[in-house]
Image: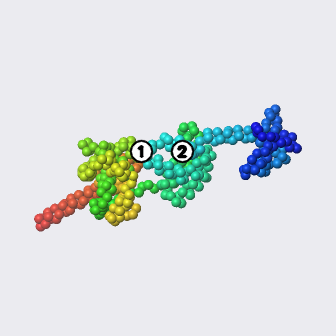
């Protein structure tokens, strides 16, 4: 309660004290006293200048309190605290994201999802609880993003939103949504291939480029079908030339895999000068590599390859296409070599295998034709001899 001298007004239960205003000058501060439901209350009504308070207005505030039309200052503070506590208990998309990412393995993929969340999900849905999401709002976001991002990128964003919500519902943190989040259809069947002359041009461009490490990585992709990320984190301790296998640790988030070392890969690995770095293809200061920089694009341009040919991942497709076209490798073996999680991912190369089989089956035509020609020649000879 105020310790200053109290001054009465013409209104019962309304008084004021003299305090300092924001400008340092004297200012009246009005207080009210009232009893409601047997409880006596005394509280501040407002300042003379700052709140434009007068005795009459202070009395009006007092009457509202007496009649229960407005809460007391204490009740207002209690209500704010309750609302604050209630808000803190809510599992919004933002809070669920914070919980969700704690259970994600740190790495590049989490960093990528962090960027997607902050740029596309948080501004629209961050403060909302999943149960309050409306299908129309999600559809609008999908349509808006498709105007500036590829279908695959939009699908990644909406997948992340789905994962966050599913994490909350599976852990009983929140109610789920009442609709299915529709993702754009994606044609992810792009399979790059090179003609023999293009491949020869590429190998010459690799040999002629100054960046030996990136050139070796491109050869590695061509010889083994390894992914770029797998080569980035490949360490010498996981290369066993004695057993003839490369151990891939946690490839694309899956179980460890083994890649056989063929003769070309063995020669390539033997040609690499080992440094103090743990990595086969080290990045800056011997650490883990995170990019191939401009060297991959430079080599692609030097070889005269199409601009949409991906220097690293494209060579992985070339590796698979050559094996499938040979007709000597079945789809199950190819799946294992490519470390695909399911046969469906390997099916894109089936047509190459089938074409090779058709060509092989077509050899029977040549065999029969040769036999017919021999029989016809023999028949002509016999007729000639009888004459």
Q: State the residue at coordinates (52%, 42%).
A: 100
Q: Residues within 10 Å of mark 2 (few under 14, many from 20)?
A: many
Q: Where is residue 101 in the image (x, y as percent from the top left)?
A: 50, 43
87, above or below 285, in the image: above
Q: Give the quarter of the figure containing the C terminus.
A: bottom left
Q: Mark 2 points at which residue?
A: 97
Answer with left or right where residue 266 lies relative to residue 227: left
380, above or below 7, in the image: below
Mark closer to the observer (1, 2): 2
Residue 313 or residue 186, whichever sits in front: 313
Q: Position of residue 190 (x, y in %)?
A: 41, 57
Q: Position of residue 344 (x, y in %)?
A: 41, 49
Q: What element carries label 1?
A: helix
> Tag on residue 253?
1
* Residue 60 in view (yes/no): no
**Residue at the top extreme of this rendering:** 38
Q: Give the quarter of the figure containing the N terminus.
A: top right
Mark closest to the chain's N terminus, 1 or 2: 2
Query: How many numbered discs sit on the rendered protein?
Result: 2
Q: State the residue at coordinates (58%, 48%).
A: 126
Distance from the alpha carbon under mark 1 to that under mark 2: 20 Å
Answer with left or right where residue 380 lies relative to residue 163: left
């Amino acid at each position: 309660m105020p310790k200053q001298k109290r001054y009465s007004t013409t209104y019962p239960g309304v008084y004021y004290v003299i305090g300092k205003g924001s400008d340092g000058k004297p200012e009246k501060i009005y207080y009210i006293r009232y009893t409601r439901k047997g409880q006596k209350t005394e509280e501040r009504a407002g300042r003379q200048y700052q709140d434009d308070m007068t005795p009459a207005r202070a009395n009006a505030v007092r009457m509202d309190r007496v009649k229960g039309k407005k809460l007391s200052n204490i009740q207002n503070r209690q209500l704010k605290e309750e609302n604050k506590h209630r808000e803190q208990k809510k599992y919004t998309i933002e809070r669920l994201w914070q919980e969700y990412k704690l259970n994600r393995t740190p790495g590049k993929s989490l960093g990528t999802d962090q960027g997607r969340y902050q740029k596309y999900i948080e501004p629209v849905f961050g403060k909302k609880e999943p149960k309050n999401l409306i299908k129309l709002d999600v559809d609008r976001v999908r349509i808006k993003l498709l105007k500036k991002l590829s279908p695959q990128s939009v699908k990644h964003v909406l997948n992340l939103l789905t994962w966050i919500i599913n994490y909350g519902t599976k852990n009983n943190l929140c109610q789920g949504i009442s609709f299915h989040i529709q993702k754009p259809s994606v044609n992810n069947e792009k399979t790059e291939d090179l003609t023999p002359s293009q491949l020869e041009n590429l190998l010459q461009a690799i040999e002629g480029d100054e960046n030996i490490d990136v050139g070796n990585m491109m050869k590695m992709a061509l010889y083994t079908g390894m992914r770029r990320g797998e080569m980035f984190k490949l360490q010498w301790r996981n290369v066993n030339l004695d057993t003839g296998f490369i151990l891939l640790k946690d490839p694309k988030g899956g179980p460890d895999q083994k890649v056989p070392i063929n003769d070309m890969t063995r020669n390539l690995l033997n040609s690499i000068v080992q440094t103090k770095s743990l990595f086969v293809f080290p990045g800056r200061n011997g650490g883990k590599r995170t990019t191939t920089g401009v060297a991959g694009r430079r080599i692609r341009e030097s070889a005269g390859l199409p601009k949409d040919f991906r220097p690293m991942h494209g060579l992985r497709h070339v590796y698979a296409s050559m094996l499938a076209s040979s007709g000597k490798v079945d789809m199950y073996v190819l799946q294992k070599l490519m470390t695909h999680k399911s046969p469906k991912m390997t099916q894109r190369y089936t047509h190459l295998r089938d074409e090779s089989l058709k060509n092989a089956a077509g050899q029977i035509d040549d065999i029969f034709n040769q036999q017919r020609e021999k029989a016809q020649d023999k028949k002509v000879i016999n007729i000639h001899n009888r004459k």
